[in-house]
Image (tube, rainbow, N blue to C red):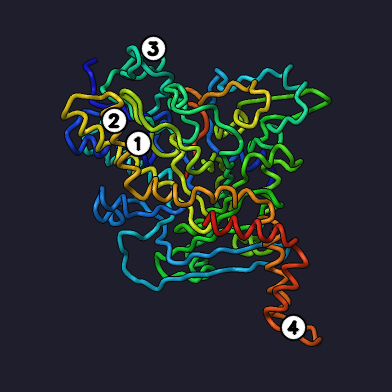
Amino acid sequence: MKLEEKLGLIRYNLDKEPHIIVNTEKCEKCRTKPCIVGCPAGCFKIEENKFLFQYEDCIECGTCKIICPKRVIEWSYPRGTFGMAFRYG
Amino acid sequence: MENLDAIVVGAGPAGSAAAYSLAKNGLEVMLVERAKTPGEKNVSGGVLYGQVLHNLIPNYWEKAPLERRITTHRLSLLSNESAFTLDFSSGKRSPVPNDGYSINRYKFDQWFAEQAENAGALLAPGIRVDDLLWKKNRIIGVKAGTDEVQANVVIAADGVNSQLAAKAHMRKEHTSEQMGLGIKEVYKLPRKIIEERFNLIGNEGAAYHFIGCTKGHPGGGFLYTNQDTLSLGLVIFLPAFEVTKDTAPDLMEHYKSHAFIQRLIRDGELKEYSAHLVPEGGYSKITKLYTNGFLVTGDAAGLAFNIGYALEGMNFAIASGIAAAETVIAATKTGDFSKRSLKRYEQVLRDSFVLKDMKTFKRAHNLFNNPRLHSTYPKLVNTFAHDLFTSKAVPRQKLVQLLIRHVLGNVTIPSLIRDGLQVVRGL
């Protein structure tokens, strides 16, 4: 099963106010970009040499903030009631 | 609003245990949770060992939503196509307080928060605490949006990424070295098939742990049987992502593709994909535990235990929640909520298994970060077992000779000595 389908099993209540803010200009200069491989929801990627980020699929683990070598990921939990919800956990 | 006795932030096992104990003792306590329903944001990567919970809620297993009572423990070393396994099964029939259970956190955390609520705690779900309220060098409450609530003490039980512990200057920024990423998939299967496949009767359950399933990166795998689902998980220590080209989801797929894992989960229907960080820093990365008007509990404080064959977090969380509550109850009697009074919390934890275990095994962290543990040794053990249990119609070597040949064929003597010392010191 593809990652998109797996994420499709999770309920989201999307907060229009992003809970992760990334300075993509600085990210493009980052040599290692461990966020791309470390994010379990595939929120970070490179497409056509552009560094892309989206917070909508985020499953709120916090990995990206910790592994960011440049410490340019501003991360908080989504506001109360927002974000994803597990049913098994 | 008047001044509360305590505000507990986070309705996981630590927070609910603290709020329950405080409310039971007649204190006015608010339990704040960012999820709409407690448990929605949480993921279990372990077995709930219940002794501590039993002390708090006697015979909890008759009331709490639990999945299966763990009677079989396995530790497997995986190599490409084989598995070498240690298996311990207990035939004990009736539950005892220190049994372990697999649990569904969505159900369990909800139940535990309800117990706190029934005891008199004010449960406030759907609220994210944004900041702490200070009066000089003392914490006097919390801020959520434009709302402010004051209390004599704030107990941080806001989990592994605890923002409150950071805001209260209890910890530095987290580093990769102290965290593991846990990814979990839940598969649905008929109860009967689970029981037959794992050789279980009735409500018995199995806990399997795997080493050698992480493409050589420090980490490990687990599988727990629930009533009619299986929880399959993989933990990768974060530094791996600085060197690997495999994404975290790829590593999960690789783990699942192992023939041994495949046959355990076959025909299961994927119901949930989840991820959560696990504190893996051990004793040296425990945060400061208290300051004026403030205590830190559970994952928020880094109170989690991993020594490969035993993983514990939830009962450490519950124990710390209870210890925090006891401290606040004592402080309420004297009216002193300064750090001089709250340091009792640390003493209670130091006298209990929580900090004693973490201290005893403080060097286990080095051992689990040794890459040879995750590739060379699982492979070595499997090829050795292969030679042991198969016949090639050539003369056999004696057991010890065979073992020495396998070990020296794969590991240099200095490495072997170093690794041996790590085992002795760590475990």
Give the chain letter at badge 2.
B
Residue hosting label 1: B15
Q: Which residue is mark 3?
A: B146
Identify the chain of the residue marked 1, using the numbered disc in the image.
Answer: B
Q: CA distance from mark 3 to mark 1?
A: 23 Å
Q: Which residue is mark 4?
A: B397
Q: Residue drawn 33% across and 48% down?
A: B352
Marking on residue B200: none
Percent of width and height locating residue A70 = 68, 23
Q: CA distance from mark 2 to mark 1?
A: 17 Å
Q: Which residue is mark 2?
A: B342
Relative image position of residue B309 (x, y in whole percent): 52, 59
Circles 2 and 1 on the same subunit: yes
Residue that appears at 39% across and 12% down: B146
Whole-percent x, y for residue B102 in the image: 44, 55
Whether residue B267 is visible: no
**Viewer-proximal residue, B410 or A57?**
B410
Cα distance, mark 3 to mark 2? 29 Å
Amino acid at pointer 2: Leu
Circle 3 SS class: loop
Number of marks in the rendered image: 4
Q: Name the amino acid, label 4.
A: Gln
Kind of residue at badge 1: Gly
